[in-house]
Amino acid sequence: MIKCIRADEYKHRDVQVFAEEEAVKTYTCLLKDIEDGHLDAWKEKKAPLIAQTYYKLPEDSSVYDMIKCIRADECMAKLVGAIIIQRRHNFL
């Protein structure tokens, strides 16, 4: 019974890591679209104050800069999640 419960925990973590991986891909595509000139307004639009504060961005930072920070957060979450999964699988 306990193995079944723990297996469900691992499945949840696997799904979470997959979702984070997809988020990284999505943010990467979004950044490329901005770089390629498809979303010029986002390259020039000022990042919201809450993002400037949270990511410690300068006042003149753009939405583009904010998205780079969000993608970096997702990359770290994916990495940490993958490490946890690996350790748990090795523990079983």
Image (cartoon, rainbow, N blue to C red):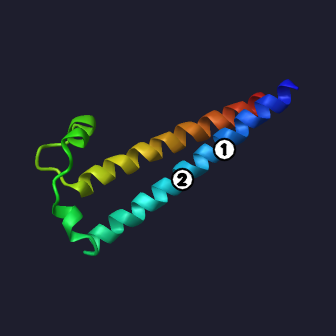
Residue sitting at x 64%, y 46%:
15
Residue 64 in the image: above or below residue 29: above
Count residues near mark 1 (Cα–Cα under 10 Å), then give few for <14, some for 14-19, many for 20+. Answer: some
**Residue reaching furthest to the left:** 60
Left or right position of 24 against 57:
right
- Residue 1 in view, yes or no: yes
Counting from the top left corner in percent of width and height, residue 59 is at: 11, 44
- In the image shown, does 50 or 21 lie closer to the viewer? 50
- The residue at 25%/53% (across/down) is 65
Which badge, 2 or 1, is on the more N-terminal residue?
A: 1
Q: Give neighbour class at mark 2: few <14, some 14-19, many 20+ (Cα, 10 Å).
A: some
Pointer 1: what residue? Answer: 14
* Horizontal side of residue 18 vs 69, given as left or right: right
Name which quarter of the figure residue 38 lies in: bottom left
- The quarter in which the C terminus is drawn is top right
Q: What residue type is labelled 2?
A: Glu
Quadrant of the image occupied by residue 39: bottom left
Secondary structure beneath disc 2?
helix
Judging by the rendered image, the residue that carries numbered circle 2 is: 21
Picture coordinates of residue 75 (x, y %)?
46, 47
Q: Distance between the residues labelled 2 and 1?
A: 11 Å
